[in-house]
Image (cartoon, rainbow, N blue to C red):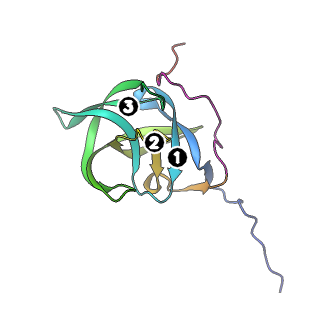
């Protein structure tokens, strides 16, 4: 009886590298570098100055660059919930969670993001496994959907 070998990487699922550039079409923000992290359940994004608003909304400043002084984009979004999250250092934090559309290459999907300060991290964003359903993470590759210089202004260029 002959053994059938399945070719590694022959899956029909969309592949993503361990780092990818992510766009936020709802917020007109392009090119945030994200670490793809299957060890984290929840996705997180680097923000400052989270201020609750009327109507179950939050205002925050999305940090778009990883160089000090940080560049910011002001965003107002619907609050999905507040959750308790255990950080990688073991500390429990209460975080605001919002939902938005992300785009990696040509692929768009709606995800939930916890709002947190990630100023000591290399990537402004962490994409957790709840957002990765149906995607195949290729741990030895990065930028499978295009390598580009980070848009430090954070906003789409005006045509």
x, y percent for residue 118? 40, 41
Rendered residue at 51%/14% (across/down): 158
- Secondary structure under tag 3 reads strand
Relative to 61, say whether 21 is above or below: below
- Asked if residue 43 lies left or right of residue 85, the reply is right
Q: Which mark is residue 107?
A: none
Answer whether residue 146 is magenta in the image.
yes
Q: Residue furthest right?
A: 2
Magenta residue span: 141-154
Quarter in which the C terminus is drawn: top right
For the stretch drawn in magenta, what is the main secondary structure?
Answer: loop
Answer whether residue 46 is magenta in the image.
no
Q: To which residue does mark 1 refer?
A: 35
Q: Earlier in the sequence, mark 3 or mark 2?
A: 3
Rendered residue at 50%/41% (across/down): 122
- Asked if residue 130 lies left or right of residue 21, the reply is left
Q: Are marks 2 and 1 in contact (CB under 8 Å)?
A: yes
């Amino acid at each position: 009886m002959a053994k059938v070998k399945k070719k590694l990487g022959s899956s029909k699922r969309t592949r993503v590298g361990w780092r990818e550039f992510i766009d936020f079409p709802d917020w007109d923000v392009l090119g945030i570098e994200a670490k793809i992290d299957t060890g984290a359940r929840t996705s997180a994004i680097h923000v400052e100055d989270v201020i609750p608003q009327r109507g179950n909304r939050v205002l925050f400043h999305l940090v778009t660059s990883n160089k000090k002084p940080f560049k910011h984009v002001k965003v107002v979004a619907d609050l999905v919930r507040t959750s308790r999250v255990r950080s990688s250092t073991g500390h429990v934090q209460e975080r605001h969670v919002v939902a938005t559309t992300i785009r990696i290459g040509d692929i768009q999907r709606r995800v939930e993001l916890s709002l947190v300060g990630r100023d000591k991290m290399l990537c402004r964003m962490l994409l957790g496994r709840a957002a990765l359903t149906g995607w195949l993470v290729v741990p030895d590759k990065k930028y499978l959907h295009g390598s580009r210089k980070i848009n430090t202004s954070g906003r789409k260029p005006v045509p």
